Amino acid sequence: MENSGLLIKPLAENKKIIPIYFKTDEIWHTNIKMPDIVVSNNSNDVVEVKEINLSGFAGGKNVVIFRNYEEQITHMITEANQLLNKYLQKPENQWRAYNLHIMFGEVPCTQDLYEETNQLKPNSMTCFRLHDLFCFHYAGVEKIDEIICQVKLSSETNEIVIESPISLTPYKCKGDYIFPIRGSATILGTPWNQVDGHRGATSQEFAFDIADFRRDEAGEFVLSSPANSSKVDDYFIFEREVLAVGDGTIVAAGNQWPNEWVKNPLEYSVERIVELTQNLLKEGVDFNHAILGNYVIIDHNNGEFSLYGHMSEGTLTVEVGDAVKQGQVIGRVGNTSNSEGPHLHFHLMDSKDFQTGNGLPVMFKNLPAGQAPFCDFDDSNSLLYSDYLFATIPELLYS
């Protein structure tokens, strides 16, 4: 929206703002990862950003307002726009493009730099990472169905207020999916987790990881026997069968990430994984394959695509173009690429492009009902909570 030569628009035009909705008793909870927006100054004046407000509406009634002021805004602008300018540098390369897409989405390339302070000169622009400023959560008798973003600025002569709606896309997954693992499972990094989850990454906004914590003789939760083992074979989840969550067609797959390189989980470090990834790229391995480890993407022919990452080398049973059925084994859990220990990475998205697609919330018809933590909400469009979720998926539910 434009006012006095000032314009607000989304940074990534294809970005869907999908709320998490869940109900406890008679109270609806709304949790939203706020988008990145751009403010452009097309006036002849220098302006400074002073305040940003988010107003949440339910049924046309303003029920909540979140505010942030100059000091916090300036810090956010500096950090966000330094990164944005770094990733938009010419010439383009795969790593910068990947980081740009994962952090900011499908951003148009521009020759102009984004301002890194809260001061906007004429014919300049800056990006607001609203989710770095606002943890938007509301509990009330109705769901939030509309948000208005208000930005207050000042010039030498005027106080200026500009507003723009933030369009929401409420969503429940279309597929009648099953969980991709049988047996004992621990679900980690769910979308509710703002700290250690995947929600900051574009297509992974509703992603989660599946491992298998169990109690040892001392009553401690461990992933392997012995605990903290240096051998992947000792981990409870390692080489567990991975199942297609629904019918579909394989649209991407990679099976060349060597298990040999990651057979000791205790050797994990980001630096080591980057080095190994670079080696694969030099050998001509596709970039997404190098990043994801051994992986599969299924098109469910309903606008939804499921991704399975970090699988074990040589265990994929499918190739691009294959048709698969719900419950079909497509591979086995591994420890390949950016993995601190054997686990399966899973997420749903609206495109086969793992870098720029929108993440989608997902639920599964065969998660056990009537046991914690799945029984303490009445309705939801997404897996919840920042704590670990423990479940045992019975074999009979796959027959």
Image: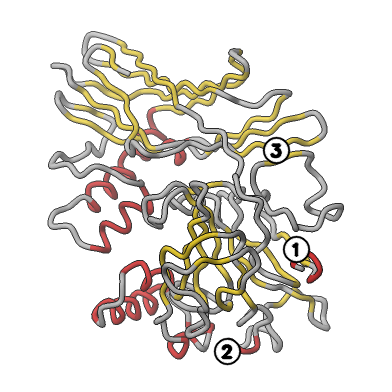
Q: Which residue is mark 2?
A: 230
Q: Secondary structure at mark 3?
A: strand
Q: Mark on residue 390?
A: 1
The relative height of residue 388 versus residue 161 in the rendered view (above or below) is below
Residue 22: mark: 3
Furthest toward the right, the residue is: 370
SS for tag 1? Answer: strand
- Up-down relation of residue 121 to residue 83 (above or below): above
Kind of residue sitting beneath label 1 = Phe
Query: x%, y% of residue 125?
Result: 22, 31
Q: Classify residue 28 by image quadrant.
A: top right
Q: Tell me the crowding category of disc 2: few under 14, some 14 to 19, or many 20 or more residues within 10 angstroms, Cα based.
A: some
Give the quarter of the figure containing the N terminus.
top left
Which one is earlier in the sequence, the residue at label 2 or at label 1? Answer: 2
Q: Amino acid at mark 3?
A: Phe
Q: Residue 211 appears in which quarter of the rendering? A: bottom right
**Picture residue at 48% right of the left edge, 84% below the top:** 313
Select label 2 or label 1 by which is in front: 1
- The answer to whether the residue labelled 2 contacts the one labelled 3, judged by CB atoms less than 8 Å apart, is no
Q: Residue 340, how many percent across, how many down? A: 52, 75
Q: Nearer the viewer, mark 2 or mark 3?
A: 3
Disc 3 to disc 1: CB gap under 8 Å = no
10 Å crowding of disc 3: few (<14), some (14-19), many (20+): many
Q: Cα distance, mark 2 to mark 3?
A: 40 Å
